[in-house]
């Protein structure tokens, strides 16, 4: 009996774009694939019939067995890495198997990451190792549970091969699901070659795929820039509301569809500080927590540069309007950010003093090294029961700083007639109890990597998929790190 014919029900639109947009090639098979994680709920959502698929999952998600309707490609893109332009990056270790239309009618990419060399591999080996694969699986699924737009993780397999980084590590692949893999860097790839027919084809494709509701009047490419800016503003605001530091916001790591993508050195902050930075290679703090809006705007300016030449507007007008969109990013970001912070404080309405109230709290948290997640989570109880203040105060090295602020906060809460039950529930719905705390992530990855024990990983993954849950408050995963584990570094050797 030959290998089974498995169909994913692919409908591949990117493969219908001109051939210079990608390279056609299959994943490189691996020695001995084993399935470590399979996201059956996501498979269901994608219409993949998980039970039929599971017997072959280790082969399928290793790239050893191709779905019969796959048309595998590696995508071309460029990008600014830490501010320096690289004209050719591309999928150096990833293969897009194809696109499915999910149960809600949305088009989703299914991509293998760690699938072997491609024409875009440059000096790389085309592979990934187990540590970063597990990390991306955990953090991306946690982000999804937090309601933040993100790529998803469908499966993780080990390869039975080693990958050489600083040491020899077990090889692995991640199967990533995305609204698409078009990045700002994809536009730059064509623009830097003077290929504006390519930029236009890509822009039209992206409008149809992601922004089909764009206002038809005016210049469609200016409207596209505006729409991308809006999604980035919403996304970065959501990151900052949960203390997420992406860590490598290069233009090739910013998805046009507005999803969080490319989980490398990312991490969540414990105690609040705007300069929080985890990545060992980010010497200058370019991608530090509080810089994220500035960087998003900088990236949008790079996108604008690629779109300007294809706008039908007069050159000067096109430039002025594009500049206005990029500069307007900060207003859009602030709007989304403040709206979210109000919710975090339990406010259902807007008042002029709110921005100040939020800033005062953040300043006190910074001075008092208060835990970001727990401060907001515990404010929910304090909002309805002043006796619960002690649990918040104790998070600050100078508890008195909280007391002064809490008086102003309560006065503001009293302006609204909201019953306690509603307020508590709405605050708990936006202030998670559990985020992927670095010391826990390390602990469960250690168990998986050192002892092959996936149980701690599964337990944490389970808790993180219900981050708002009331019971989660008492959970050991909600606790801040022991002091000696506070300094945390992430590495790019993925
Ligand atoms: P990343 O740092 O994962 O965003 O990747 C940046 C660029 O380097 C992309 O073009 C990747 O495809 C490429 N890349 C990263 N790791 C490898 C690898 N092990 N082999 C080949 N290309 C890689
Ligand atoms: Mg990348």
Image (cartoon, grey):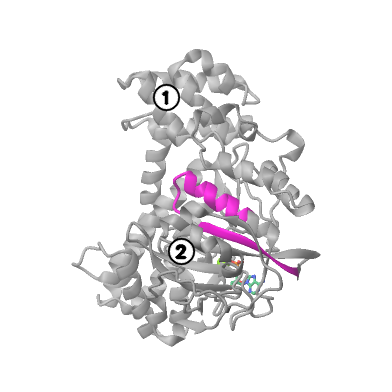
Label 2 sits on residue: 255
Q: Is 149 displayed left or right of 223 in the figure?
A: right
**Residue 394 location in percent, x, y?**
62, 22
Q: Nearer the viewer, residue 417 or 354?
A: 417
* Residue 137 belongs to the span the image colors magenta: yes
Callouts 1 and 2 close, C-beta under 8 Å: no
Q: Is 192 displayed left or right of 314 in the figure?
A: right
Q: Tell me where residue 341 sits by quadrant.
A: top left
Disc 1 to disc 2, how far (Cα)? 35 Å
Question: Where 283 falls versus 441 (above or below)?
Answer: below
| Residue positioned 71% across, 40% down in the render | 486
Q: Give the range drawn in magenta.
A: 135-162
Which residue lies most toward the right here?
167
Q: Nearer the viewer, residue 139 or 356?
A: 139
Question: Where 439 falls versus 320 (above or below)?
Answer: above
Quadrant of the image where one finds ligand 1: bottom right
**Residue 215 location in percent, x, y?**
22, 63
Say which quadrant the N terminus sits in: bottom right
**Residue 456 location in percent, x, y?**
68, 43
Q: Nearer the viewer, residue 118 or 219?
A: 118
Label 1 sits on residue: 424
């Amino acid at each position: 009996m030959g290998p089974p014919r498995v169909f994913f029900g692919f409908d591949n639109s990117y493969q219908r774009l001109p051939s210079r947009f990608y390279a056609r090639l299959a994943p490189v098979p691996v020695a001995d694939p084993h399935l470590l994680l399979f996201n059956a709920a996501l498979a269901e959502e994608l219409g993949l019939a998980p039970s039929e698929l599971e017997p072959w999952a280790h082969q399928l998600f290793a790239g050893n067995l191709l779905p019969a309707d796959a048309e595998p490609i590696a995508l071309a893109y460029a990008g600014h890495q830490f501010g320096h332009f690289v004209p050719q990056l591309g999928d150096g270790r990833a293969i897009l198997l194809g696109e499915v239309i999910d149960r809600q009618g949305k088009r989703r990419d299914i991509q293998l990451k760690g699938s072997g060399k491609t024409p875009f591999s440059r000096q790389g080996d085309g592979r990934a190792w187990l540590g970063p694969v597990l990390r991306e699986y955990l953090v991306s699924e946690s982000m999804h549970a937090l309601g933040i737009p993100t790529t998803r993780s469908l499966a993780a397999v080990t390869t039975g091969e080693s990958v050489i980084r600083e040491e020899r590590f077990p090889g692995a692949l991640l199967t990533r699901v995305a609204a698409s893999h078009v990045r700002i860097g994809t536009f730059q790839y064509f623009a830097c070659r003077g290929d504006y027919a390519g930029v236009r084809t890509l822009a039209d494709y992206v409008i149809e795929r992601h922004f089909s509701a764009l206002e038809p009047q005016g210049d469609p490419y200016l409207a596209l820039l505006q729409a991308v800016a809006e999604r980035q503003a919403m996304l970065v605001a959501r990151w900052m509301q949960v203390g997420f530091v992406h860590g490598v916001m290069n233009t090739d790591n910013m998805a046009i569809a507005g999803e969080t993508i490319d989980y490398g050195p990312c991490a969540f902050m414990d105690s609040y500080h705007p300069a929080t930075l985890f990545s060992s290679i980010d010497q200058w703090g370019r991608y530090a927590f509080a810089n994220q809006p500035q960087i998003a705007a900088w990236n949008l300016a790079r996108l604008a540069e690629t779109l300007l030449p294809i706008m039908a507007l007069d050159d000067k007008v096109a430039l002025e309007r594009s500049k206005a969109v990029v500069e307007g990013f900060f207003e859009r970001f602030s709007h989304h950010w403040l709206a979210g912070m109000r919710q975090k404080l339990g406010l259902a309405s807007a008042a002029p003093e709110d921005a100040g109230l939020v800033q005062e709290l953040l300043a006190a948290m910074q001075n008092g090294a208060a835990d970001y997640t727990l401060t907001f989570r515990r404010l929910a109880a304090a909002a309805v029961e002043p006796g619960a203040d002690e649990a918040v105060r104790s998070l600050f090295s100078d508890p008195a700083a909280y007391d002064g602020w809490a008086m102003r906060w309560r006065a503001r809460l009293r302006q609204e007639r909201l019953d306690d039950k509603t307020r508590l529930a709405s605050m708990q719905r936006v202030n998670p109890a559990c985020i992927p705390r670095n010391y826990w992530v390390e602990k469960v990855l250690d168990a998986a990597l050192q002892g092959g024990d996936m149980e701690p990983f599964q337990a944490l993954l389970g808790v993180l998929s219900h981050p708002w849950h009331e019971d989660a408050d008492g959970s050991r995963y909600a606790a801040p790190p022991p002091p000696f584990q506070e300094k945390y570094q992430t590495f790019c050797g993925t």
